[in-house]
Structure formats: C-alpha cells, structure tokens
Amino acid sequence: MRIAFVLGIFPALSETFILNQITGLIDRGHEVDIYAGHPSPTSKVHSDVIKYGLLKRTCYKTQMPKNRLLRLLKAVGLILVNLHKNPIALLHSLNVFKYGKQAASLNLLYSTIPLLSRKKPYDIIHCHFGAVGILGAYFREIGVLRGKLITTFHGGDVNVVTAVEGTDFYKSLFAKCDLYTINSTFTAGKAIALGCPRDKIVKLPVGVNLAKYCFKERRATIGGAIRILTVARLVEKKGIEFSVRAVAKAMKDYPNLEYNIVGDGPLRESIEMLIGQLGISNKVNLHDWCNQEEIRNLYSEAHIFVLASVTAANGDKEGQGLVLQEAQASGLPIISTLHNGIPEGVLNGRSGFLVPERDVEALAEKLVYLIRHPEIWPEMGRAGRAFVEEHYDINKLNNRLVEIYRELLLDL
C-alpha cells in the first residue's frame, strides 16, 4: 500500500507513537510518505528517524512569513511560479467561502504548494490529531492528495481544541473522513459527544516496541538510592507540581530518594522554582527532552514511575498516557491518577496504584507504601509487562492497523 501521513510536526521527540506506526508500516513493506507543517524545533531526533531515512520521505509546508504583508507578497510569487503545476487545486486553496480562516490566512495555500506536483494517488491518507485531520480533508477535497482518509484522535484534540474553537469545530471533518481511530474508550466517548460517527470509530491504542523496552525486575539495595522517574511534557495536565510535592513529602522520611523528570515545556521555570522552594534541588534532576535510547536507559535505572495527570484549567486531559505502558513494559511499578483514559492502561492494585487527581497526600501515601515494600516490586513489574504484551505490543497493533487499512480499501 501507498500511505501518506499528514502531521503537524515531524519528527517530534514526544510523539514516538507516530514514529512507531511509520516504521512498522515500512517494515511490513508498505510505501510511506510524510507531509508535515513544521520540522522539529530541536536537532535531537530518535535513531529510527535516521535509520529509516524518514527526513528524505518528508515534505514540509512552505515557510510562511508572520508579517501579513510579506506573507501576501510571497504568496503572489508562489502563485505565479506554481500555477502551471495544478491550477485548479491552487485556486481552490484560496476559496475563503469554503475554507474560511485556512484560506483567508493563506495557510492552506502555503500548505498546498509543496503538494502540487504530487500526481500519484495514495491508498490511505492518515492524519494524526483532529486539527491536522481537517487540513488532510482539505488536501483531498482540493485534489492534491487522493486516497481513503483516516484521522486519529489522541485526547487533547477533543478537549482543548473544542474548548477554544467550539463544539462544532470538527463538524466538517466528521462528514468527510472515511474512518477515525482513537486510543481509548474515554477519547472515543468524547469524540462521539462532539458528533463523530460511532460506526466509523475503531479503537486502536498507541503501542510499545517491546523489543526495545527490556524487562527488568526491580529490587532495592540496602542503603542505595531509590530512583523515581517521570517522563512528560511540562504542561499542566501532566500534574508535575503534584508529583514533585508528593516526592518532597516522602523525602522527609526517606532522604535516599532521587527524582528524575524528563521533558520540557512552558511550566519548566515554575517547576524549577517549586523544587527550589521545597528545598529538594539536590535530589531532583530536571532533564530536557531525551531521545528513545536515553529514555530507555532512565527507565532501566529507575525503581518507581510516577505520572500525576490532572484535568487542566483549559480542559486538556490525557488520552492514553503511553509512557505508562513504556514504564510497565520495563518492569516499573506505577503510581498515577484516576484520570480519563489512564485506568484503561494500568492494572490498578496489580501493576500500579491509581489515586484521585491533585491529591498530594494520596500520591505520597502510595509512594511511601512502595518504598516500604520493595518485595512487591518484581510481582508488580511482571504483571505490568504481561499486560502491555497482551494489549499494547506495537507489532500486534501495527498488524491491526494494516488490517484496518485493508478493510477500509475493500469498502469501496
């Protein structure tokens, strides 16, 4: 099959789930091209991006000036140079009556320009995140991409975007896609409430490459450090404030704790200030984003994994929380929250403990319980690994993805 992935940013260090789908499809002999709005703002990439030569397969939106006058002047030049390639599609991209802000801002034009010479149709056009799905639907409608259209929702795109843009934001998308894949039952429910056709939804969690996440039983060493790990973007919904406060409480009685937080984002400065105010700067390591190899090493060295996700003030919520499956695959006991899609991906009481959102006392209580009972770490780790092997193995999920594509192509 020929498959086009339409993405917002590529390659993004935090979106390994998309990378794993792309490489899995290539491994299965399918031809994959990538269309992205922007390259990653960091030069650090996962090794598979290089191994599979994915940047050579990637086409980016034409750079669009922020200044409106410069944007308009550049657009005139682009139209004159590219009109002969596909005049109908190019002119459609300027139709403000049909495409509204996307056309009026010239974003659709700048996004369309690199696709004008692409004549060969695709079997599948796969868009990740709802807003990107709208753009993918426009591409197909104006004729620069052809194929069956799939949009994958991940969580934030059915919470934050609709809170800002309104509940009708995806109305046109829900009328145009051939299928929607969704990572959890929770996310599916949110999408259905917004008008997504129930009969076109397929639940497909994002998965873990188990060959790369080696299982290791966790055991404490007498007098040794107990290492706690969080891997998350530094945004409100990840609840870093609450995990930091819980770890600080536990450190009062257990000074041998070490806390590693991996990620970056707009809350970095406030989190650094909180760590300083709590007097635990010498015990907490705040890392920048790491590539997959670096993160796997941190999983391997840790004893307990914490993700204290919450519902953010802007409505942002977790869809699945893939890091929880990565941590369980590595054999780590989990502490997380009773938050949206998370309970589907953790065996509460067996592979980890789930507590109410924003409850520092409950987080600290479960953390102290695990610290006091290291003898249960191996059993919890085994339960988590078996759970991930059954439900989140990327090889099984990529095989299912290919089945979904083929079933959609048969439904002509």
Image (tube, grey):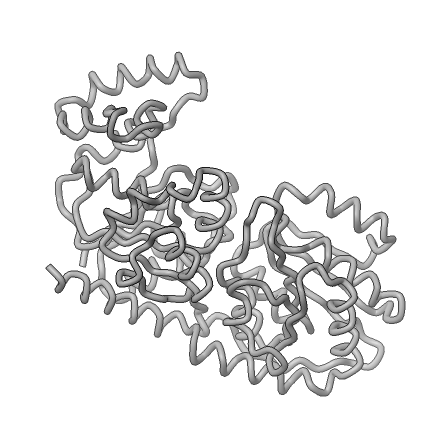
- Number of marks in picture: 0
Q: Residue at x 68, y 57 (%)?
A: 261
* 383 lies left or right of 166: right
Residue 100 is left or right of residue 85, and the answer is: right
Instruction: Decide: is 218 above or below 252.
Output: below
Q: Position of residue 364 (x, y in %)?
A: 78, 68
* Residue 172 position in % (x across, y down): 29, 42
**Dividing the picture into quarters, in which one does residue 262 lie?**
bottom right
Pick the front one: 108 or 198: 198
Residue drawn at (84%, 69%), measured in percent from left and top? 256
Is residue 101 at least partly visible in the picture?
A: yes
Above or below, 351 against 113 in this view is below
Q: Residue furthest left?
A: 412
Q: Is residue 412 left or right of residue 407?
A: left
What percent of the width, then of the height, locates residue 33?
27, 49
Name the residue at 68% across, 44% down: 268
Position of 149 relative to 329 (above/below): above
Locate residue 196, reporting x and y percent. Answer: 33, 54
Q: Quadrant of the C terminus?
A: bottom left
Question: On the rendered image, what quadrant is the N terminus found in?
Answer: bottom left
Q: Residue at x 60, y 55 (%)?
A: 232
- The answer to whether residue 26 shows anywhere in this view is no
